[in-house]
Every structure is written in structure tokens, then in C-alpha cells.
Image: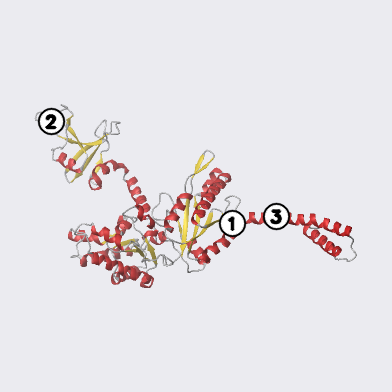
Amino acid sequence: MQPAIRTGALLDRVRADLGRPDASPQQLRTALAEVVPAAEELLAQVADLQGQLAQARTCPVTGLPTRSAWTTQAQEVLAAGPAAVLLADLDAFKPVNDRFGHAAGDAVLAAVGARLAQWAAAEGAVAGRLGGDEFAVALPDGPGLSARITRLHTLLTAPIAYRDLTLTVGASIGTARTARPHRRHRVRRAQAGRHRDVPGQGPGPPRPPSRGDRAAAHPCSSRPCPSLPKGSLMTQSPLLPEEALNLPNALILLLGASGSGKTRTSKMFEPHMVLRADDLRAMCADDPGSQQVNGPVWQALHTMLDARLGLGLRTAVDATNANAGDRQELIRAGRSHGAPVVALLMGTAPSVAQARNAVRAANRCVPADIVATQHAQIVAAHPRLAKEGFDHIVFAEELPVLGTALERLAREERAAEPIADVRRAFGDAAADLFDWDTPSRDMQYRTGTFGAGGESLRVRWMDDGDPYDLRFEALVSCPTDWCAGPAWTPVRSVAELAAAHRNNPLDDTQCVRCDS
């Protein structure tokens, strides 16, 4: 007989005995004596069930609530007011399991769970483990959410000590922040919006969601403008912002007043992808700020845009795009080629844009009233962008712009490694005129040649083991009248290269023959 059934039968018999009018005191004492151990047994069973329930609601590896327990807690957070849902999964977790064993995998999960719990406690959030390497957080929305998510990402991806190893995993974090949709829809949006953090890759999804709240730390960064709310209109489909920007044939229109940071933001794209009105003005009028050539500039821009979209190439247009008519022409161009059209908005505060614009060169400085008008036009257009024909609306402040730009530049730097020293010393333009000699013309040092047309200037890279005396030297004539040379002179800038090419070096020379 089951304990609960046995105890129930005993209580029924004791109840009957206590109800008998002719029961003696001894019979009553005997009946009560039987109840006490039965009650203790029941209490023990209840405590055991409570323990089992607590275990079922708590992940034994991470110490976090399980899916069902977290869902209950998350519903309370989401019902309390504006909230955000984060879904995180660990990148490169399976290789840790496969290579080092499940004990190492459990150590990673335990460390991640502890860090997530610590972060959630500090943020007034509730965190849980959904299963596998997937975790969820529900937290009240508020100022600085982007920076808080960035801190979480840093915590989750920090190295983990395991025995004599240091284990590292990445993290993908999806974010949904709005009070209006049902909780279930917010979770789905977060699932669709995971931000990939894949080392060594570009804008395809790295890193943590937002950088807007770093404005206080750097005078050139952009604080999100309160006039442009970033709620449910952040994207128009279940694509995270980076995925929308990475659609292979996308047309990306940067929208922002002068000084809002469009050119800086465009650095996250490969240079050949960006059509920039200022660059075309410089080509047409030798002046990137010239407004006298706007007609030819926009005609050329549309011609190049049509060619790129016709080839199915992803293209970004760096222009103010504050005017609805200008946007419509560009949207029509995208539609004619079946390209998804993405609005990339600058959320920069007007005061920041005005301050940046004020310190520009005179030919680039836009009058303050025009900057204010541009900003007002974009703020007014924001709620209507989807109706205008944009497929996705993304805020620059929700993107890893700086990280993506640096990763792209690092890739370019690695590709140019063979002439990295030349670029560092003389710049990119001069490096385009340079080739290393194969084989070197010097037995001791590596030599190369700057050449164009029928002219050339030979140089050598002086590396004699002294890290404080690395330099290039150029081949020139001996400074004496009686020695034919040759001689070498240090060159540390393009100006010194030019002087050496004129055989009029700016630094001392050392002759190979006479040592003059």
C-alpha cells in the first residue's frame, strides 16, 4: 500500500474512534499516538516533493531557473511595464564538448550561469536556462539598455578557467524591446534577432547589439536621439539589424542630418559598396562641399546605383536623404531591381550634429538652420518609413559600427601585410607606387622600388636588430664631387622620398664607397 493511502486509511480509522461516544481515555490516547508518526511521515513526503519541485524548476548545472520556471517569472516582469526579452546562445560551445569532454562543457555552462545570474541580480532581471546552450532574460526596459546588454555580452564571452585550460566561447544575443506586443511575440522577435559574435567576420553579425549609450565615454560617438523612438519599428521583419544590412542585394539608405555621423557609420561597409554624394562632388568640382554640381552628382549617383543593383550588388547610399522626394527616387530604383530597401537612421541628438558641423571646414559647414530642418524632416518621416516602401528600418546606434569597421580595416591590414611597413612610413597613396624587389638587390637588407612611368627610386628596409632604429633608406648619389657613389639617405616621410628622388636629400647620406 502506498504511504499516502496507508496514512489516509489510518486517519479515517482514528477519526471514527475519536467520534465514538463510548471511547475511553486510553483508546483516545492510543488513537492520537498513531496519528503523530503518520503526520510526520506526511510532512516528510511534502518536504521531499517540494525539494523535487525545486530541483525541477532549477537547472542543476547552472543554478538558473528552467524554462517553465523562468517563463512564470518573466510573465511577471513583462506584465509590470515596458520590458525587454533577451535570448542568448553560446557560439562554439559544441567544439568545447567534443574536444575536452562533457565535464568541460558543464564547467562552461556553470560559469555562464553564474555570470548571467550575477548580471541579472544587478539589473533587476530574471534569467533562466531554456535548454542546451540557450539562455533567456526578461528585464525592465529603460535608459542604457544597449550598454547593459554590451556588459552582459562581455561577461558571457570572458575566458573560463577549467583545470589547466582556458576555455572561450562566443555569444549571440537577440533583443526585443517593446511594451505593446504580447510576451509570446516578444520572445519570437528576440529569437529572430540574435546578434552573432563570430571572431574574424565582418558585419555579419558579431558582436553585442548597441553602441548608442557610449556617447558619454567618447565625444565623437552618438547618443540616441529621444525624438526617434526605437521600439517595435526597429525592423519590419524577423531579421536582426545586421542581417538586414547583410542581405546580398540590399539597397541601404543612410538617413541623417549633416553632422549626424553617416560617413563614420558607412565605414562598416566595404568602400566600394558606398556611393557617397560628397565624393562625387569632389570628383566633379574638386570640392566635396560644392552645391553647384548637385544635378550632375545625383545623375551620376543614380547611374552607378542602377548599375550595381542590376548586378545584384549590395549598395549603401551615404547622403542626407531627409527629403521624401529624394528617398522615393532611390526606393523606386531598388524596387525596379527587386532589391530589399533598408533605412539606416542616425539617432544622433541635434546638439551633437550641430556641434560637429560647426567645426567643419568652411566649404563643408552646413548652416545651423538647415541642419535643424534636416533633423526635423527625418524625425517626422520616421513613423512613415515603412509606408514609403522601406522593408527594414535600422538604427545605427543598435549596430556594432565601430567593431565592424575595425574588423574590416584589420582584414585589409592583414591583406596588405607585405607592404605594411611602407604604408606605415609613407601612407596608402605612396604604397600604391611601391613593390619589393624579387630577389632583393642587397645582400644584407631587403630592397624595393617606388616606380611610375619611366622613373624609379630604390629604397631598402634597415632592420639591424635595433627595434628603435628601424627605417627606410633611399639610394642617392654621393654628396662629394669626386665619388660616383652610390649612397643611402634615411627617408621617413613622403617629403623625404620626394627630396631623395630629386637627389637633394633632407637628411645625412652615407656613401657605400667613400663613406662620406
Question: Three-letter amino acid code at disc 2?
Answer: Ala
Precedes in sequence: disc 3 or disc 1: 3
Precedes in sequence: disc 2 or disc 1: 1
x and y percentages locating residue 291 in the rendered image:
20, 64
Q: Secondary structure at mark 1?
A: loop
* Vertical placement of residue 281 versus 384, above or below: above
Marks 2 and 1 sit apart, C-alpha to C-alpha, by 85 Å
**Foreground disc of the pair 2, 1:** 1
x and y percentages locating residue 45 in the rendered image:
73, 55
Residue 433: mark: none
* Vertical placement of residue 421 versus 244, above or below: above
Residue 171 shows in this picture: yes
Instruction: Find disc 2 in the rendering and name its residue.
Output: 484
* Vertical placement of residue 186 versus 468, above or below: below
Instruction: Find disc 1 in the rendering and name its residue.
Output: 66
How many other residues sit within 10 Å of disc 1, few (<14), some (14-19) or many (≥20)? many
Please state if 496 lies on the left or on the right of 385 as rendered: left
Q: Please report the residue visible at 47 percent of the width from the left and 59 percent of the height from the top.
A: 174
Question: Three-letter amino acid code at disc 3?
Answer: Ala
Question: Three-letter amino acid code at disc 1?
Answer: Thr
Marks 3 and 2 sit apart, C-alpha to C-alpha, by 101 Å
